[in-house]
């Protein structure tokens, strides 16, 4: 019997990328799955893919408090409780702060930070009752600010600080709170990243073939949950970035700058 067998696992943003990979990994482990996303067609296809699985899928924009409440309440109506909440839904951005519309900053914070806050708030009494798990999918950008990703880094720094506070508050309840910080992972997040006007970038300058797959990332996340890890940084580059930023911050500034600027020009 697996650790996840018969547990109710909520995965936000489950129609694509890491979220979809998490569901693909959880299904054979016997989990009851609740997920949400903004794209109805993708959620419908997900349910068609697993017609015999106990799965609850709802269209939901996690930046909207009322929609998060509806998603969590409908999950409770379906399954009766929640054991594990994986706050995975997220959005990125690609624009220098001098050029970006302020609405892009707000939208990124609303999805990446407040989406996790809303879903956790409404699920928390049941997770406490189950002595369950709360997970935040963060990023290396939550340890090291990245140029052209000011809002994204801010949202992930906020997410990690909030989760650390929450973990301390819940120490005596038996609830485990953790975050996982993938490095560059092959997914749609770069293509969907917002440009300076808040429109989808549509293409990525990164070589997706050289990145960790979403499936490998999902496997690491579930392993970390089962082992009760405090936090996890994935990929050698991610670990090196966190290490250098902690112990050699000036060097880290220069290396990060050189990575994102070529011949004095910012590379998105």
Image (cartoon, rainbow, N blue to C red):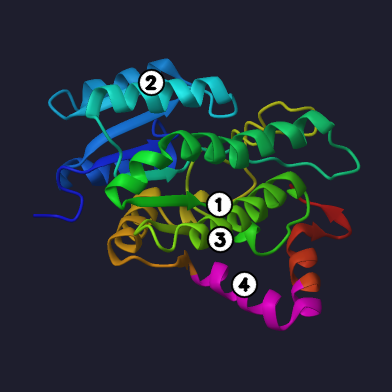
Check the image and report above or below for 66 versus 152: above
**Any mark on residue 266, and which?**
none
- Contact (CB < 8 A) between labels 4 and 3? no
- Give SS at disc 1: loop
Disc 2 designates what residue?
58
Mark closer to the observer (4, 3): 3
Q: CA distance from mark 3 to mark 1?
A: 33 Å
Circle nearer the N terminus (2, 4): 2
Check the image and report above or below for 247 versus 155: below
**Any mark on residue 242, and which?**
4
Q: Position of residue 38 (x, y in %)?
A: 49, 22
Magenta stretch, overall SS:
helix
Circle nearer the N terminus (2, 1): 2
Circle nearer the N terminus (4, 3): 3
- Contact (CB < 8 A) between labels 2 and 4? no
Q: Where is residue 174, by image quadrant?
A: bottom left
Q: Which residue is at the front of the view, 71 or 172?
A: 172
Q: Position of residue 177 (x, y in %)?
A: 44, 57
Q: Which residue is at the front of the view, 69 or 139?
A: 69
Magenta-drawn segment: 236-252
Disc 1 designates what residue?
207
Q: CA distance from mark 2 to mark 3?
A: 29 Å
Mark closer to the observer (2, 4): 2
**Label 4 neighbourhood size at 10 Å, few (<14), some (14-19), many (20+)?**
some
Disc 3 designates what residue?
164
Residue 259 in view, yes or no: yes
Check the image and report above or below for 45 versus 118: above
Circle nearer the N terminus (3, 1): 3
What residue appears at the point 34 percent right and 21 percent down from the top-left corner?
Answer: 74
């Amino acid at each position: 019997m697996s650790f996840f067998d018969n547990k109710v696992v909520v995965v936000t943003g489950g129609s694509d990328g890491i979220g979809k990979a998490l569901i693909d990994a959880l299904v054979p482990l016997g989990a009851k799955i609740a997920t949400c996303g903004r794209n109805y067609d993708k959620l419908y296809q997900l349910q068609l893919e697993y017609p015999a699985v106990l799965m609850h899928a709802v269209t939901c924009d996690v930046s909207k408090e009322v929609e998060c409440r509806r998603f969590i309440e409908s999950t409770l109506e379906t399954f009766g409780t929640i054991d594990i909440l994986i706050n995975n839904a997220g959005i990125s951005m690609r624009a220098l702060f001098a050029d970006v519309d302020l609405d892009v900053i707000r939208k990124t914070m609303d999805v990446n930070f407040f989406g996790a806050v809303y879903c956790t708030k409404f699920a928390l009494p049941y997770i406490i009752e189950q002595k369950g798990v709360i997970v935040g999918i963060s990023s290396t950008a939550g340890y090291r600010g990245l140029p052209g990703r000011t809002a994204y880094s801010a949202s992930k720094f906020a997410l990690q600080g909030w989760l650390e506070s929450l973990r301390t508050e819940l120490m005596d309840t038996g609830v485990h709170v953790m975050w996982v910080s993938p490095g560059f992972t092959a997914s749609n997040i770069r293509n969907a990243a917002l440009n300076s006007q808040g429109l989808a970038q549509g293409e990525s300058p990164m070589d997706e073939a050289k990145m960790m797959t979403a499936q490998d990332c999902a496997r690491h996340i579930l392993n970390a949950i089962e082992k009760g890890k405090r936090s996890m940084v994935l990929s050698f580059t991610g670990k090196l970035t966190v290490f250098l930023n902690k112990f050699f911050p000036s060097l880290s500034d220069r290396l990060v700058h050189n990575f994102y600027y070529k011949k004095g020009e910012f590379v998105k």
